């Protein structure tokens, strides 16, 4: 199945596909193992910073090998891309999807730049999915004690149905990520805001294309289930698994002070990411 077919199938079932970011092969192995054991599709994301570290061409080759040689429904997404130049690199590398992030731009400029990205991508490979965002929810995957400045969490600041309809119609994107109470990063002092499920449902009914939820780390389990039922078909998780990776590595270093082999030290991080991803995938698929 193509990525679009996979997401459409989830859409019909009222469940969501999991999207998890990586920075190294330890996390990649953990995510693929979890998805394989649960027999669920999964999307691997690489932000611009993660692509610079991991290598977008290398990641694309690995994904193709996993799909073509091993038959695994694993897809690669160029997450949060801020320029047409970097979109072109991701397309040339062979990503299954790209995200143009113009959420901080004024609406008119976001539409203009997103439309340009869509036209380019579809002229090169119509099969590559293009996603874009409307509504600012922060940019960094980190632990925070205060809501990121400018993040849309109040009801009056969330993406409106009217703006969503206009944005999707004028840009021609394949997938749409609205601001519905979600925030990038993860709070360490208070609970993340509740998702506005009614807004998700209203936007979905109006735009019809698949909806994506960014900033999934820290969101209540019940909100995930309700969001999937309301129209969210793809859920992004990053900070949660980064935290699991780091905490496991710290324990591994403390327990093995004389060990210097990275692959031995990272076994704990791989196991921790596997556990975290497994739980999220089961929740998203309502298993």
Image (spheres, rainbow, N blue to C red):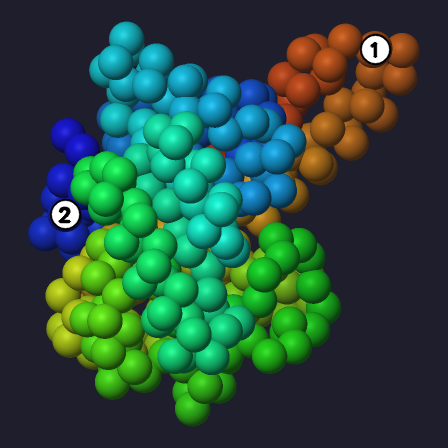
Q: Which residue is nearer to you in this view: 160 or 167?
A: 167
Q: Earlier in the sequence, mark 1 or mark 2?
A: 2
Can see residue 212?
no
Circle 1: is it few (<14), some (14-19), or many (20+) Cα within 10 Å? few
Question: Residue at image x 13%, y 44%?
Answer: 9
Placement of the C terminus among the 4 image quadrants: top left
Look at the numbered disc 1 and give the secondary structure of its residue: loop
28 displayed left or right of 126: right
Q: Residue at x 22, y 51 (%)?
A: 15
Q: CA distance from mark 1 to mark 2?
A: 46 Å
Q: Which residue is mark 2?
A: 8
Q: Horizontally, is 68 left or right of 140 in the view?
A: left
Residue at image mark 1: 259
Front residue of 50 and 199: 50
Classed neighbour count for the residue bearing mark 2: other residues with Cα under 10 Å, few (<14), some (14–19), many (≥20): some
> Residue 276: image x %, image y %?
50, 38
The answer to whether residue 84 is seen in the rendering is yes
- Label 1 vs label 2, nearer the camera: 2
């Amino acid at each position: 199945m193509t990525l679009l077919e996979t997401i459409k199938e989830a859409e019909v079932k009222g469940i969501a596909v999991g999207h998890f970011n990586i920075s190294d092969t330890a996390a990649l192995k953990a995510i693929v193992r979890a998805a394989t054991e649960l027999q669920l599709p999964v999307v691997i994301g690489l932000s611009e910073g993660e692509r610079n570290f991991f290598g977008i061409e290398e990641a694309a080759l690995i994904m193709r090998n996993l799909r073509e040689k091993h038959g695994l429904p694993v897809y690669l997404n160029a997450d949060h891309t801020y320029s047409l130049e970097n979109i072109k690199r991701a397309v040339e590398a062979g990503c299954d999807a790209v995200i143009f992030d113009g959420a901080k731009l004024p609406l008119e400029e976001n539409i203009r730049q997103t439309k340009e990205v869509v036209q380019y991508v579809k002229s090169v490979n119509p099969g590559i999915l293009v996603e874009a965002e409307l509504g600012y929810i922060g940019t960094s995957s980190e632990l925070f004690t205060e809501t990121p400045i400018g993040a849309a969490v109040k009801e009056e600041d969330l993406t409106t149905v009217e703006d969503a309809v206009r944005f999707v119609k004028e840009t021609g994107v394949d997938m749409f990520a609205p601001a519905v109470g979600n925030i990038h990063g993860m709070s360490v002092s208070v609970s993340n805001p509740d998702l506005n499920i009614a807004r998700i449902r209203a936007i979905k009914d109006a735009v019809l294309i698949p909806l994506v939820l960014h900033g999934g780390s820290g969101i209540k389990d019940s909100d995930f289930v309700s969001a999937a039922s309301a129209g969210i078909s793809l859920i992004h998780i990053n900070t949660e698994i980064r935290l699991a990776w780091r905490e496991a590595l710290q324990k591994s270093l403390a327990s093995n002070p004389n060990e210097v082999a990275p692959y031995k030290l990272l076994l704990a991080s791989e196991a921790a990411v596997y556990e975290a991803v497994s739980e999220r995938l089961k929740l998203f698929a309502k298993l």
